[in-house]
Each structure stands twice: as structure tokens, then as C-alpha cells.
Image: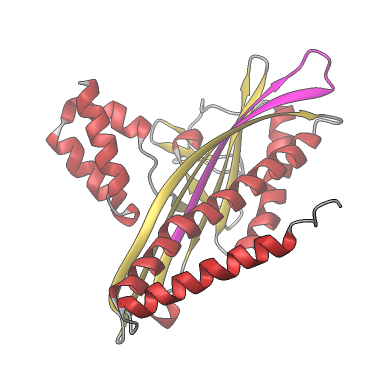
Amino acid sequence: MEGQLDCALDLMRRLPPQQITKNLCDLIDLAPHLCEDLLSSVDQPLKIARDKTVGRDYLLCDYNRDGDSYRSPWSNQYEPPLEDGAMPSEKLRRLEIEANSAFDMYREMYFEGGVSSVYLWDLDHGFAGVILIKKAGDGSQLIKGCWDSIHVVEVQEKSSGKNAHYKLTSTVMLWLQTNKTGSGLMNLGGSLTRQHEADMAVGEFTSHIANIGRLVEDMENKIRNTLNDIYFGKTKDIVNGLRSTLTSADRQQRENLKRDLADAIKIRSQPPAAV
């Protein structure tokens, strides 16, 4: 069974991220005994709901779900209504409200649109939370796409109260689709998961927001650069290699010239020998 699960997860990593939900359902139909393991292991694109109480959108995930209801970070109410749904403590709820406000500004500055949500819950020696960000393209200029990022953070407060240990697990799903006359239909997408742990100083309880924000910002920048290098850079290399106007002799001559220039620069940069 473990071998089947590994193969299923390996297959999901190679399928288009914009079709994760459909592919996951098809895979569960083929192997029903893997249902729970697949649902808990495969991150799916975030869905958007509307909080009718305050008139704002929020994101749905397993971390704000209780049964068939989802809790809004804005009104702190479940939809459909749920009387005994899981709630953060009053102290943590105040931090959750400030965190949603902070990451709402972060999302607007970095993504210029989209939807973000932050959910926190209590632990025995600290708390945990998830930061969700979704930005979908509007389809203008014949380009479609979507960015989904899921950042799960666990905060363990030290006994001194002056430091805390943060463990961040981030997953980003990105896909783009273009359909132009010159290039035709092209799909490009992928997902990455990364982890990072750090000990950081803590002043007031609200300083956790600044610490978590710094970790999330650094992680998103790293993942964004990695996605750019792996998917876009590799695609560019492949496209450039499909057709070349240079002959093999011309390419070899150019490579030799580059190597000679690099050797000359290296020699000139070396300090002169002592007399």
C-alpha cells in the first residue's frame, strides 16, 4: 500500500496543477483505499467563499473547516452556521484579526489583488496557523493563470518568554496558460513545497505577526525565484534550442571565444607575483 501511495503522489506531482481536483477524484476512483492518505497529502487549489455578514471574500481550507462548515476570518462565524465549531481563544483571536489585516496589506502590495486569509488555533505550548493567498489572472491579453500559496506555521514559545521557535511549511501552486496566434496554446505550471525553521526574539504577543510575516515573505521570494528558474528558465532554454540560425561550427567558434575571454579575464584579475 505504501508503494501505491508513493506512486500516486509521484503521479500527482507531474500532472497540471490547474486540474488537481479532477485528477485527485479520478485517482481516488481508481484506488479508493488511498482516499484518506491522498486527501491529507495533496494540496488542492484554494476556493473562495463570501462572508455575507461583512461582505468580504475569504479562502476555504481544511484548517478553517469543521464538518461541512467553514469559519470566516472576518466575522468569526461558520457558514453554514455551526453552534459548537472550533474557535481560537480570545487572545489568539485578537492576534488573528491583526494578522489578517497585516497579510491583507502584504497581498495587496505584492499581488495587487486576489484574496488572503489567516487562521490560527491553540496548541499546548504555543499556537499554529495558516496563511493563505490566492491570485487568479483576469484573462486579459489572452493570458490565464493562478497563484495559490499555503503557509502552515507552528509557533513554540520558549519558557523564557523572550524567544520562540517557528516551523514554516510552504506550498505554492502556479499555472499559466497562453493562447496566441503566433505561439498557439501553451500550458505551464508546477508546485513546490519547502520547509524552514528559525528561532526569533519575541517582545509583545503581536510581535509574532512581524516574525511570521518575515518568514513568509522570504519563503515566497525563494519559491518564486525557484519556480522562475525551473519552469520558465528551462522552457526558454528548450524553445531556444529548438531552432538556431547558427551552424555547429559557428556555435563552436562562439564557445571557444567565450572560453578564451573568460581565461583572459581570470589571468588579469590575479595579483602580480611578488618580486
**Left or right relative to 104: residue 22:** left
Residue at 43% x, 64% y: name it.
232
Q: Is residue 112 positioned above or below 30 on the image? A: below
Q: Name, please, the residue furthest toward the left.
A: 30
State the image coordinates of residue 27 (x, y, percent, origin top left): 19, 39
| Residue 86 image position (x, y, % from top left) | 54, 27
Majority secondary structure of magenta residues? strand
- Give whichever of 121, 174 is nearer the camera: 174
Quarter of the rendering containing residue 31: top left
Q: Position of residue 93 (x, y in %)?
A: 69, 33
Q: Is residue 78 magenta?
A: no
Camera-side residue of 152 and 228: 228
Direction from residue 134 to residue 9 in the image, left or right: left
Q: Nearer the viewer, residue 22 or 93?
A: 22
Percent x, y of residue 129: 60, 33
Quadrant occupied by the N terminus: top left
211 lies above or below 22: above
Would you place residue 29 above or below residue 259 in this image? Answer: above
State the residue at coordinates (48%, 55%): 227
Q: In the image, which residues are magenta?
A: 146-168
What residue lies at 59% left-to-right and 70% top-to-bottom?
A: 261
